[in-house]
Amino acid sequence: MKDLEIFKKKFDPYLKDYLNKKILDIRKYTKNKSVIDYINYAKKITIIAGKRIRPYIAYLMYESLGGKNMKNALKLLVSLEIFHSFGLMHDDIIDRGSLRHGTLTTHIYITNKLKKEKRQGDLIYIGNSQAILLGDILFSWAMEGLNTNTDFNPKIISKVIKLFYQMADEVIVGQMIDVDITTRDKVSKEFIDEKIRLKTASYTFIRPLEIGASLANSLTTSIEKFCQAFGLCLGIAFQTQDDLLDITSNEKKLQKTTSSDKSQNQHTYFTYFKSLEVGKEIIEKNFREAKELIQKLSINENAKKKFFDLIKLIQTRTF
């Protein structure tokens, strides 16, 4: 998708600059080479191959509603991508993933490094522990980026921070639900709906859309309703498609660990309905409804095209 690629090229220098500044701060605290190496690896994982979907969605909404200051918006939206990296770092430990963006996940990288150095102790446990702590640092950096922002009106920043904290609560609770239901033999469809709404729809679509609208000072009641409805449709389609890819794709194609749902007793629409076809129908229905919502939205035709292109990207994705 050309628009997303253009956005990534403009966005990544701000992401790299902020991460480099924070790593320089860390070097003031410690000369421990191992710790600095781990933090640099977290930076690497954050930067390489990430699609920048969440900051792009936020920026697309900001721009569609009349936002003009690209530089200030991109600087602020760095926090969204860093928060995403925090979440993935913890998620990889929970899911026992070994690959992320075609690269070793952080806990596996650290464990392997410790083994190579012939360190003492339970090295798998220590690798996991260090990766958890690295995720915590990224969370701190994401929040600092918001709380120290002076580019936007304080009232706008206050609203964005509130949405950000709501997003954090929702995705963490959604992850907790996801982990909880792996201990259950059967779950209701309502449990799966709730997991998807919190873990995927809110985190990846609804809150980024609302953050973008807030930055443009345009989060009206009607726009908020659009963000909720459109984000939920895309979230359901995105997560169900992700579950389908987990079933049908290989690790080389996806560049991450696959086939974990069944082995970890994950509950999805596919396990609930015991049908690939029903799951595919859910994906198609929600993509169709998302397009209908865009048609009704009062934005210019160029902005609508970018939203339609975003839907097409998600529909045809292999990531």
Image (tube, helix red, strand yellow):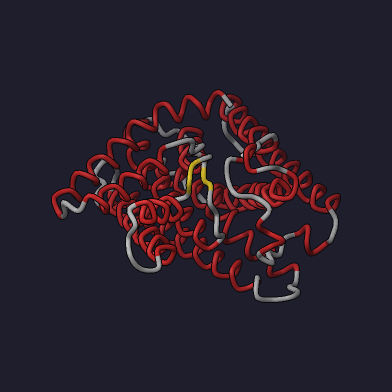
Name, please, the residue furthest toward the left: 28
Which is nearer the eye, 168 or 276? 276
- Location of residue 274 in the rendering, given as x and y in whole percent from the top left corner: 84, 60
**Residue in the image at 41% along x and 40% along y:** 216
- Rendered residue at 76%/74% (across/down): 186
The residue lying at 63 percent from left, 47 percent from top is 230
The quarter of the picture where the N terminus appears is top right
Residue sitting nearer the eye, 37 or 266: 37
Please tell me how many numbered marks the rendered image carries. Answer: 0
Split into 4 quadrants, where in the image is the C terminus?
top right
In this view, the residue in front, 271 or 207, is: 271
Vertical placement of residue 150 versus 308, above or below: below
Q: Is residue 319 above or below residue 306?
A: below
**Can residue 179 be seen in the rendering of this structure?**
yes
Q: Nearer the viewer, residue 260 or 91?
A: 260
Residue 187, percent across and down?
73, 73
Determine the image quadrant of residue 248. Answer: top right
Query: Residue 108, position in %: x, y?
Result: 46, 53
**Going by the picture, which residue comes out furthest to the front?**
118
Horizontal relation, residue 155 to residue 24: left or right: right
How far across and how far down the image is residue 10, in percent? 39, 27
Res 229 visible: no
Q: Is residue 208 left or right of residue 260?
A: left
